[in-house]
Amino acid sequence: ANAAAAAAAAAASAAADAAAGATPLVEGGAGISLAAALDGSLLELRASLREEMRAVQVELIRELEAQRHEVRSLIEAGREEVAALREENAALREENARLRAPPLAALGLQRWGAGQVT
């Protein structure tokens, strides 16, 4: 019964291949169609391409992660530099304000002793 079912399935497959225009090949004494041989090759090619695409994607992710880390480091260094410059600017503004203050003589004051003003 199983042999008859297998033979019927093989005959149906051969008939379908013939209807599709496939030409039978002989491999190891068993007839296989060109379409079946191409299907096997295409499946192998697809699997190979998937593996290669996955490897490329993983490599891209690694590179992007490295770039992200580098950019984050650069931004942090820039923030530290800006903070230092802001502190220096504040100190310079205070010094400028002190230096722009009117002289004591213009206010009618005189300096005497150790920093005492009259």
Image: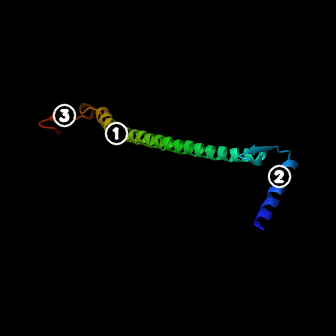
Q: Is residue 78 left or right of 51 when viewed as pictured?
A: left
Q: Residue at x 53, y 45 (%)?
A: 58
> What residue is disc 1 on?
84
Q: Position of residue 21 (x, y in %)?
A: 86, 45
**Colour scheme of this structure image?**
rainbow
Q: Residue at x 77, y 63 (%)?
A: 3
Q: Secondary structure at mark 3?
A: loop
Q: Residue furthest left?
A: 113
State which mark lies toward you, 1 or 2. Answer: 2
Can you tell which quarter of the image residue 105 is in? top left
> What residue is disc 2 on?
14
Comes first in the chain, label 1 or label 3: 1
The answer for how far apart the CA atoms under marks 1 and 2 are is 81 Å
Q: Residues within 10 Å of mark 1 (few under 14, many from 20)?
A: few
Comes first in the chain, label 3 or label 2: 2
Q: Quadrant of the N terminus?
A: bottom right
Q: Position of residue 77 (x, y in %)?
A: 38, 39
State which mark lies toward you, 1 or 3. Answer: 1
- In the image, residue 111 above or below residue 47: above
The answer for how far apart the CA atoms under marks 3 and 2 are is 119 Å
Q: Secondary structure at mark 1?
A: helix
User: Closest to the observer: 96 or 13?
Assistant: 13
Amino acid at pointer 3: Gln
> What residue is disc 3 on?
110
User: Closest to the observer: 84 or 54?
Assistant: 54
Q: What is the number of the mark on residue 22? A: none
User: Closest to the observer: 54 or 90?
Assistant: 54
The answer for how far apart the CA atoms under marks 1 and 3 are is 38 Å
Amino acid at pointer 1: Ala
Q: Look at the numbered discs 1 and 2 and tell me whether their residues touch, using CB distance below 8 Å.
A: no
